[in-house]
Amino acid sequence: MARRVLALLLSVFLAATAFAADMDLERAKGEGLVGERADGYVGIVAPQADAPVQAMVKQVNQKRRAAYEEIAKKNGTSVDSVAVLAGQKLIERATKGEWVTDAQGNWRQK
């Protein structure tokens, strides 16, 4: 039951962030500069990512962390477990050609 509630809250969070997605993030993903990590956060794929891209990744990850903390608190679970579940869902939703990581942190193109 708790896992189902957690999954529901996470689905709502992911749906909300999909509609409010920052175009810069989507563009950076499309250009192969950043991708979704299995731990629920965005990561820099390309070593040539400039300072604005790095700042955007940091900002996105701070927002995600805050949301994961809120969901974890409501469900009496760890932030890491919420983040990993989110990572799985975000990787599932990634489109063909986007970069994602596996559980070991290795980048691959979907």
Image: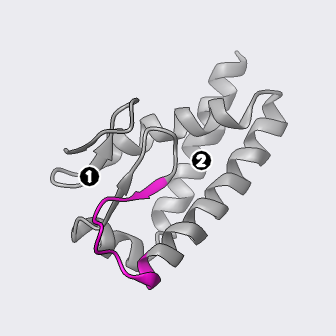
Magenta span of residues = 42-53
Residue 63, quarter of picture:
bottom right
What amino acid is labelled 1 in the image? Trp
As displayed, is residue 38 above or below residue 70?
above
Give the residue drawn at x 40%, y 30%: 103
As displayed, is residue 30 above or below residue 97?
below
Which residue is the site of mark 1? 99
Give the residue drawn at x 34%, y 33%: 102
As displayed, is residue 94 above or below residue 75?
below
- Marks 1 and 2 close (CB-CB < 8 Å): no
What amino acid is labelled 2 in the image? Val
Which residue is the site of mark 2? 12
As displayed, is residue 45 above or below residue 103?
below
Pick whichever of labels 1 and 2 is earlier in the sequence.
2
| Residue found farthest to the top | 1
- Quarter of the picture containing the N terminus is top right
Residue 66, quarter of picture:
bottom right
Residue 60: which disc? none
Q: Position of residue 14 (x, y in %)?
A: 53, 50
User: 54 and 30: which one is in front?
Assistant: 54
